[in-house]
Amino acid sequence: MGHLSKVTQAKRLAEVTECCNEVEVVFSKSGITTQWNPSFGSILDLAEAQGLNPDFSCRSGICHTCVCDLKEGEVDYSPEPLETPSPGMVLICCSKPKTDIVVEI
Ligand code: FES
């Protein structure tokens, strides 16, 4: 029995690490590489969970205080910001990574 449960556990671990939804987020200025987790509301939330303190004000896509360079990858906005930032920039308070991303934070 003990043997069986070990096998099951190993298999579960493999499933978790191989899961298709793994998205890597790199905060390039801080040298932090982390994994996106859908339980975060935004890239800003994830940055704060990593101990970073990016600038923000409205946290809802209005003020553009949180705008950062998006060096690689694509994001999804939710909610849609009032004005989308220029190409190569991202509003981290209202976006989630769509692909692996590199953000200048
Ligand atoms: S904090 Fe205002 S747009 Fe992100």
Image (cartoon, rainbow, N blue to C red):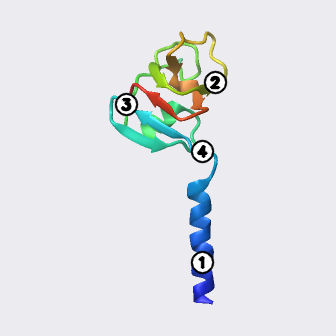
Marks 1, 2: nearer the viewer:
1
Question: Which circle's residue, 1 or 2, is located before the other in the chain?
Answer: 1
User: Which mark is nearer the camera, 2 or 4?
Assistant: 2
Residue linked to disc 3: 28
Give the quadrant of the C terminus: top left
| Separation (CA) of disc 2 from disc 4 | 15 Å
In front of the other: label 2 or label 3? 3
Type of amino acid at the residue the image marks with label 1: Val
The earlier-in-sequence mark between 1 and 4 is: 1
- The alpha-carbon separation of the residues under discs 2 and 3 comes to 21 Å
Q: CA distance from mark 1 to mark 4?
A: 28 Å
Q: Which residue is mark 1?
A: 7
Q: Secondary structure at mark 4?
A: loop
Residue 19 visible in the displayed image: yes
Please state the horizontal and vertical placement of residue 92, each as a whole percent of the image: 51, 25
Residue contact between numbered discs 1 and 4, judged by CB atoms under 8 Å: no
Q: Which mark is residue 77?
A: 2
* Chain-order first, disc 2 or disc 4: 4
Q: Amino acid at mark 3?
A: Ser
Residue that badge 4 annotates: 39
Front in this rendered view, residue 5 or 59:
5
